[in-house]
Image (spheres, coloured by chain):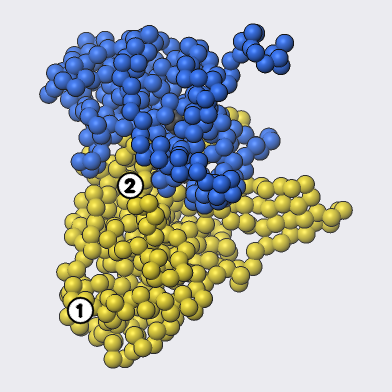
Chain colours: A yellow, B blue
């Protein structure tokens, strides 16, 4: 795939062409001082590029908070089913995601294709193009470099844009979907603007990135977790946890969902919606028995699932170090801090 | 170590209390967070200042967190005290099980061992009305019905149904919430505009006359949706209809008097 250099000031023109081509574009938008992904219709709506993260991750592009799996209608004894046609899903561009957003789709896809290939997720993802921007700042919650990512990491991106101090932007096109997006602005992504693999721009890119030394390694964590099932650490860490769904819902890799009915007599819909392992009801049996009866056991599940079970079963880590869970948590459960203390035990 | 930290450390050391719930420094210098102190050493980490805004009363009904024996100390803000008192009035926590403590401006620790002392302390320390909240309510009050409906639809379309607003509220203590009841399914459980509105209507109706105005629901919402305006507005309505005095037991909408002026009671 090719790399290009364009001017910072050309980015909006390119986005305008993407919008004009009829793509649904989701981008960071600031409302009342808070920035989150929203559908936009003009580059002017996009938030200034001065915040580390959006509140929510980009996962909603392929895994919306609620979606219809199928609808049904009963007439006499005949039942007809109606499934959403994946072709009807809009071609979507996530503009100015972060590398940790892009990385999130690797574990997410692993889950949605584990034993069953989830057509709806796969179809949405196939129609989603991720334009990530390298991070030039990190905050107290970021830890991508501890889990194999980085502020300028391309993995999972369709396109990675890095704004350089010189006023240029290095555009690394990583996939065919990315190429299709670049092709919408042939004037910008021309041979004249192509960047050779040995260009000094790549060194400039490195110097433009946020500095974020790794605090632990995935392997450290996994080694400690192998022995930690009965550790008192779960209770110690989770005492203040309120058991809400905030951390899971903002997380780029949390994939747990619930299936719900929307019945209206002889017709209705079946709906998939986000769920969270922090909820007390999440594992409750009909008998009333709950195999994860306390918040401590639910917190343990959250950590073990992401850092032990997923690496074991799916060869993926269920965390990209984006820090969103910690920013969203109403009681400041700081995942970086908790993991660091586990790694140092 | 502050003098009050030392006092609390001593209480933990000599068994006056088995656990103390308070605040410690958080992830950033702007933040504090809840802290559970099981021993005197942990008490050194306790802080109390204007950054302490979590409503710790939410933990007082979580039995799994509390030692079966012994008293539990709480280093409390006025909002925590108000919620604790409300919980006592609703028979959710027994008087005497908790030793609520307020830290005065000079670091003086005041012990508030029972409902009466709580009442007096709260009356002596009224919290100022938040002018931003008042301004927002005025703004919404000035809207037409249609505008208001559009405002809340737009706002709650963003809700993800994480229920952090429920989890953070000390008075949302039901072990089985109506949103989890599915026979019948009173409230549609997924996140989309109408079901989200249903959830908030239900939440604020259950809070009517009970909400202490602490703002914990709003502070917890990851989307920063101004849902505390709903409870605040309902409190205003209740005050208008029933006055600002609250019964010592029960709540305005769940108590009755045989000599009620309305005749439905007879
Ligand atoms: S667990 Fe937290 S830090 Fe890790 S990917 Fe999810 S939201 Fe980001
Ligand atoms: S967001 Fe925080 S309080 Fe809520 S479940 Fe997650 S860790 Fe617990
Ligand atoms: S302001 Fe919100 S959290 Fe506080 S008591 Fe009222 S409803 Fe509950
Ligand atoms: S905390 Fe906010 S997003 Fe979560 S359920 Fe409540 S209103 Fe919705």
**Other residues around mark 2 within 10 Å, as few (<14) / some (14–19) / many (≥20):** many
In the rendered image, the vertical position of residue A237 relative to residue B90, given as above or below: below
Q: Identify the residue at image location x=67%, y=16%.
A: B262
Query: Is disc 2 placed on a helix, strand or loop?
Result: helix
Q: Nearer the viewer, mark 2 or mark 1?
A: 2
Quarter assignment of residue A211: bottom left
Going by the picture, which residue comes out furthest to the right?
A76
Is residue A327 in view from this perspective? yes
Residue A91 spot, x, y in % from top left: 52, 72
Q: Quadrant of the C terminus of chain A?
A: top left
Residue A327 disc label:
2
Name the residue beneath numbered marker 1. A201
Which chain is home to disc 2?
A
Is residue A307 in view from this perspective? no
In the rendered image, the vertical position of residue A258 relative to residue A152, given as above or below: above
Image region (quadrant) for ligand 3? top left
Which chain is home to disc 1?
A
Q: CA distance from mark 2 to mark 1?
A: 33 Å
Query: Is disc 1 placed on a helix, strand or loop?
Result: helix
Q: Are marks 2 and 1 in contact (CB under 8 Å)?
A: no
Residue A64 lies left or right of residue B121; in this view the side is right
Q: Quadrant of the N terminus of chain A?
A: bottom left
Badges 2 and 1, same chain: yes
Quarter assignment of residue A189: bottom left
Residue A248 disc label:
none
Q: Identify the residue at image location x=62%, y=47%.
A: A260
Mark with earlier residue (2, 1) = 1
Going by the picture, which residue comes out furthest to the left?
B1
Q: Identify the residue at image location x=79%, y=50%.
A: A266
Residue B108 spot, x, y in % from top left: 18, 16
Residue A220 spot, x, y in % from top left: 25, 49
């Amino acid at each position: 795939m090719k790399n290009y250099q364009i001017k910072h000031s050309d980015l909006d023109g390119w986005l305008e062409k993407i919008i004009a081509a009829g793509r649904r574009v989701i981008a960071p938008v600031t409302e009342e001082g808070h920035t989150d992904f929203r559908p936009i219709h003009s580059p002017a709506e996009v938030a200034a590029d001065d915040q580390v993260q959006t509140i929510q991750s980009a996962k909603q592009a392929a895994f919306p908070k609620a979606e219809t799996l199928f609808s049904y209608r009963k007439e006499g004894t005949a039942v007809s089913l109606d499934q959403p046609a994946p072709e009807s899903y809009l071609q979507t561009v996530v503009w100015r995601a972060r590398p940790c957003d892009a990385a999130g789709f690797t574990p997410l896809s692993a889950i949605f294709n584990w034993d069953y290939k989830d057509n709806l997720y796969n179809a949405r993802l196939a129609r989603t193009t991720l334009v990530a921007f390298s991070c030039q700042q990190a905050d107290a919650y970021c830890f991508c470099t501890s889990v194999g990512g980085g502020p300028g990491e391309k993995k999972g991106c369709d396109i990675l844009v890095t704004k350089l101090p010189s006023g240029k932007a290095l555009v690394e096109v990583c996939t065919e979907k990315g190429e299709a997006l670049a092709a919408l602005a042939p004037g910008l992504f021309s041979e004249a603007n192509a960047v050779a693999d040995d260009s000094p721009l790549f060194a400039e890119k490195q110097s433009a990135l946020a500095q974020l030394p790794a605090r632990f390694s995935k392997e450290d964590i996994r080694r400690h977790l192998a022995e930690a099932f009965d550790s008192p650490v779960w209770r110690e860490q989770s005492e203040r946890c309120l058991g809400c769904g905030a951390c899971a819902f903002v997380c780029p890799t949390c994939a747990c969902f619930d299936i719900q009915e929307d019945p209206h007599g002889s017709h209705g819909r079946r709906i998939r919606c986000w769920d969270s392992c922090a909820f007390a009801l999440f594992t409750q049996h009909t008998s009333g028995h709950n195999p994860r009866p306390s918040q401590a056991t639910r917190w343990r599940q959250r950590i073990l699932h992401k850092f032990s079970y997923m690496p074991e079963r799916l060869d993926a880590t269920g965390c990209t170090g984006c820090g969103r869970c910690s920013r969203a948590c109403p009681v400041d459960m700081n995942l970086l801090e908790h993991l660091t203390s586990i790694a140092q035990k | 170590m502050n003098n009050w930290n030392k006092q609390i450390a001593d209480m933990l050391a000599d068994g006056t209390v088995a656990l103390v719930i308070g605040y410690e420094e958080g992830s950033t210098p702007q933040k504090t967070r809840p802290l559970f102190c099981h021993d005197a050493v942990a008490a050194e980490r306790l802080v109390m200042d204007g950054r302490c805004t979590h409503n710790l009363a939410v933990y007082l009904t979580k039995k799994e967190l509390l030692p079966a024996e012994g008293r539990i100390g709480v280093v409390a803000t006025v909002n925590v005290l108000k919620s604790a008192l409300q919980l006592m009035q609703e028979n959710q926590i027994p008087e005497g099980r908790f030793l609520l403590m307020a830290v005065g401006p000079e670091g003086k620790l005041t012990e508030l061992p029972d409902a009466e002392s709580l009442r007096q302390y709260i009356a002596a320390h009224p919290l100022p009305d938040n002018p931003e909240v008042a301004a927002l309510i005025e703004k919404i009050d000035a809207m037409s019905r249609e505008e208001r409906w559009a405002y809340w639809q737009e706002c709650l379309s963003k809700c993800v149904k994480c229920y952090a607003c429920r989890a953070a509220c000390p008075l949302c203590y039901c072990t089985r919430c109506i949103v989890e009841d599915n026979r019948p399914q009173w409230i549609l459980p997924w996140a989309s505009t109408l079901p989200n509105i249903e959830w908030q209507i239900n939440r604020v109706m259950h809070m009517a006359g009970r909400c202490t105005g602490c703002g914990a629901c709003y502070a917890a919402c990851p989307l920063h949706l101004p849902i505390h305006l709903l409870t605040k507005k309902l409190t205003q309505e209740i005050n208008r209809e029933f006055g600002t005095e609250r019964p010592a037991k029960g709540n305005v909408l769940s108590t009755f008097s045989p000599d009620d002026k309305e005749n439905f009671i007879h």
